[in-house]
Amino acid sequence: MTTATTDRSGATATTRKPATMAQALTRAMRDAMAQDPTVHVLGEDVGVLGGVFRITDGLTKEFGEDRCTDTPLAEAGILGTAVGMAMYGLRPVVEMQFDAFAYPAFEQLLSHVAKMRNRTRGKMPLPITIRVPYGGGIGGVEHHSDSSEAYYMATPGLHVVTPATVADAYGLLRAAIASDDPVVFLEPKRLYWSKADWSPEEPQAVAPIGRAEVRRRGTSATLITYGPSVPVCLEAAEAAREEGWDVEVVDLRSLVPFDDETVCASVRRTGRAVVVHEASAFGGPGGEIAARITERCFHYLQAPVLRVAGFDIPYPPPMLERRHLPGVDRVLDAVARLQWESEWTERPEAFEGGTR
Amino acid sequence: MTVLEQPGSHRPSPPPAWRPRTDPAPLLPDAEPYRLLGTGAELDPELLGALYRQVVKGRRYNRQATALTRQGRLAVYPSSTGQEACEVAAAMVLRERDWLFPSYRDTLAAVARGMDPAEALGLLRGDWHTGYDPYEHRVAPLSTPLATHLPHAVGLAHAARLKGDDVVALAMVGDGGTSEGDFHEALNFAAVWKTPTVFLVQNNGFAISVPLAKQTAAPSLAHKAVGYGVPGRLVDGNDAAAVHRVLSEAVDRARAGGGPTLVEAVTYRIDAHTNADDATRYRGDDEVAAWLEHDPVTLLERELADRGLLDDAMRDGARDEAEEMAARLRDRMNEDPVLDPMGLFDHVYAEKTAQLREQAAQLRAELEAENGDHGDHGDHDGQAKGDGR
């Protein structure tokens, strides 16, 4: 397979025509459908239009309306019928179109999808993949840019994964569709058009769910991140080099199950950690991750675990989203704060309000 | 053409999409609930006898389950006393390969479908949720959230048809459930996709304490079907023969590719919402008494007697069968269920996550500390995979 380069670094490799994350996702569904006749794609606009982001482009043409189906506009209905389809032995892949459009389906997701295996003591597993384009940075108006991963993470029974590279988009989606458990597949929509040296014509690897990937090796601090924030952190790591900081970047890829092993191994090596994500800080994934690191790596830590996250506000208007989304400068600022160990002990006020 | 234009006639006629695309008349339910018992209609004596035995058994089941709540053997029981005709007819019209999607009040339908009565009560007993294998009798887990199981019935019927199986899914919901969004979405999906799904609304008058008049302004719940392009049928829910007839027709139609039907069975919940509810706060004794006059068991007995079909042998036979079932249920429910706490971590995922393995180890240590010896909790570290389908 092609090397697991990041989108940014991948753009420099030019042996083949670069592929986009969107293409890799389409290819993943196409391959899964070709290989397994029980895989069915359904959602609003996924058929003739190929999805509003064209991720399901060509699937209806190739596999027919029964395999890639335009549904009525009703998210609870889409996911609810997918539950019934899965009960009868199909593997539905549903599209929720936009992050905040998934909320009407939350009751189906929380009360049935996440619990059916458990309720029936393993008799009725639901192999459903729920594709949710999520996150900001594309200038979308209200309700088109939410980062809802904390809600999914807080629901036992769901797997939650999110790719950051073209290769992972393919590999993780194949793994999600093949999984016998429901998987919330979060697609960072601002990376849809990111490119990498990845050939859709060649055989591709499946990426295991539940394993994080170290995207950049470093020794002085670890950035723990996922999805749309991975390229931000890689850029910040490069910039930090000028300050004499050798920063490691861990791409979680899977929020549930969580890869404590890779994260803790990294933090124990570097002794410093910053969690970076777009979702709001309060009650967000960063709090959970910081707690896990503190519980497991306390004696290795040279500084408190910091979070760089979105503000605790409803997603802002697109004209201001640049001010909300954690960017390279904010990540670098946090990295800089990690080195003030003496100030942390002597002047705790230096950290007041300074978690981002 | 020399006809003078009338004022306003220059306005072009509306595009075709403005006109109704389906004639709603054939979809409309009858003005009065459909009845068979006491009308002199032609009825199969064998079917009448079978309905009678099932309804008598159903009544006994409701009584026994209610008694078990008083003895602390059941955590809660939402009784279907008064609604037995709907419950047993729903089960009787289905073939073995069909699916039943019950709500939390429909344990009797699951039992009438052949499920062990004690197994059907697992959830309500406080045992493992669901407690039965849904694939054994093709009964979906009892749904506690309202109407959320209706889209499941649509999806399953859709999948079966895609696979070329002539399977029908019958989903049961109460009058309150028709106010939920999932009711709407399920009806709409089923209608658009023409899935072989039958929706049975048991209108028992109350959603806990809220009467139908405060639930909906629709002419009837069966009328709701028309808006989706689905035929609505209104039936006397205490008339077992009528419910059986109407549901049979709906099931046949679904199996033949005719799409979904919405059946409203007008009935009454004789008992309170559950054993924990006080129905006297929201309804009068007169109302209950009037409905007792229209009891499903009485209606069948009267019909059988009028036809000269009800003799002591039939009456005793039905009663003995019911008593035997109740005794078996009592015996089973008097056994203390043994739940292995280590089972808590099974079946959350196909494979335990590292986090669940850690938590399982914690609980195991707690159990060992409590018991000295933890005993045999079985192998909970392996894969917990159900065959599924």
Image (tube, coloured by chain):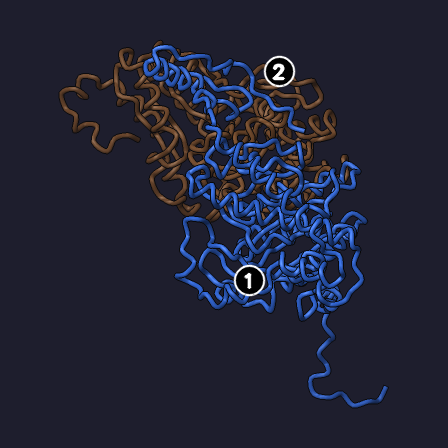
Furthest residue in direction left, as rendered: A346
Position above or below: B125 against A339: below
Q: Label 2 belongs to which residue? A: A2
- Where does the image place residue A262, in percent across and percent down from the top left? 43, 14
Residue visible at 66% across and 48% down?
B316
- Where does the image place residue B380, in percent across and percent down from the top left? 50, 16
Front-lying residue, A26 or B220: B220
- Where does the image place residue A276, in percent across and percent down from the top left? 38, 27
Quadrant where the C terminus of chain A is found in the figure: top left
**What subunit carries mark 2?**
A
Amino acid type at mark 1: Leu
- Residue A31 is tagged as none
Q: Quadrant of residue A275?
A: top left
SS category of the residue bearing label 2: loop
Mark 2 residue crowding within 10 angstroms, few (<14) / some (14–19) / many (20+)? few
Position above or below: A55 against A3: below
Direction from residue A44 to residue B304 in the image, left or right:
right
Quadrant where the N terminus of chain A is found in the figure: top right
Residue B114 in view in this figure: yes
Chain A, colour shown: brown
Direction from residue B141 to residue A226 in the image, left or right:
left
- Residue B292 is tagged as 1
Direction from residue B334 to residue B190 in the image, left or right:
right
Amino acid type at mark 2: Thr
